[in-house]
Image (cartoon, rainbow, N blue to C red):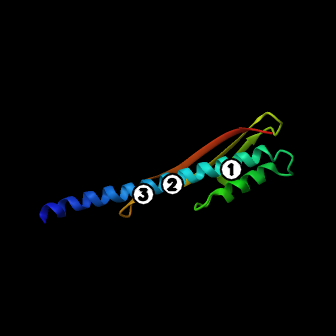
Amino acid sequence: MVEFALVLPILAVLLFGIIQFGIVFNNYITLTDAVRAGARKATVSRQAGDPVGATKTAVTDSGAGITIDPNQISVTSDWQPGDSVTVQASYPYSINVLGFVVKSGFITSKTTERVE
C-alpha cells in the first residue's frame, strides 16, 4: 500500500500529461488540415472579390472542433496565375497537468500552393 501511494502521483501526472499531449497533437492535425483547406480555396479564388476573406473563411470553417481566430490567419500572395499563395495560422494551446500549466504557447501551421 505504501509503495502504491508513493508511485500513484507519478503515474497520475504521467497519464494526464500523455492525455494533454494527445489533445494538443489532435489540435495541431486539425489546424494543419484547416490551413490546407484554406490554401486550396485560395488557389482557386484569385478572381473573387475578396480572396483573402474567402481563404480565412475556409480556414475557420474547416477547423472542426477548434475555434480559429481570423486575426491569427495570414494569407500572402500576388494573386497572379502561377505565383504561390501562403496560408499560415496559429492556435493557442496549454498543457495542464492536475491543474498546473506545464507549457503554453501557439501551434502554427503553414501551407504554400500555386495559384491557378
For the residues carrying marks 3 and 2, which lies nearer the camera in this image?
2
Which of discs 1 and 3 lies nearer the camera? The answer is 1
Measured Cα–Cα span from mark 1 to mark 3: 26 Å
- Circle 3 residue: 20
Taking depth in this image into account, of 103 and 9 the one nearest to the observer is 9
Of the numbered discs 1 and 2, the one sitting upstream in the chain is: 2
Pick whichever, 41 or 74, lies toward us. 41
Q: Distance between the residues labelled 1 and 2?
A: 17 Å
Left or right: 36 with respect to 100? right
Give me the residue at 75% from left, 49% from top. Answer: 41
Mark 1: which secondary structure? Answer: helix
Question: Residue 100: which numbered mark, if any?
Answer: none
Q: What element carries label 3?
A: helix
In the picture of the structure, the residue carrying the numbered disc 1 is 37
Left or right, 96 with reference to 110: left
Which residue has dot 2 on it? 26
Q: Position of residue 100 (x, y in %)?
A: 38, 60
Q: Which residue is drawn at 17% across and 62% down?
A: 4
Query: Percent from the top left, x then y, of residue 114?
Result: 75, 37
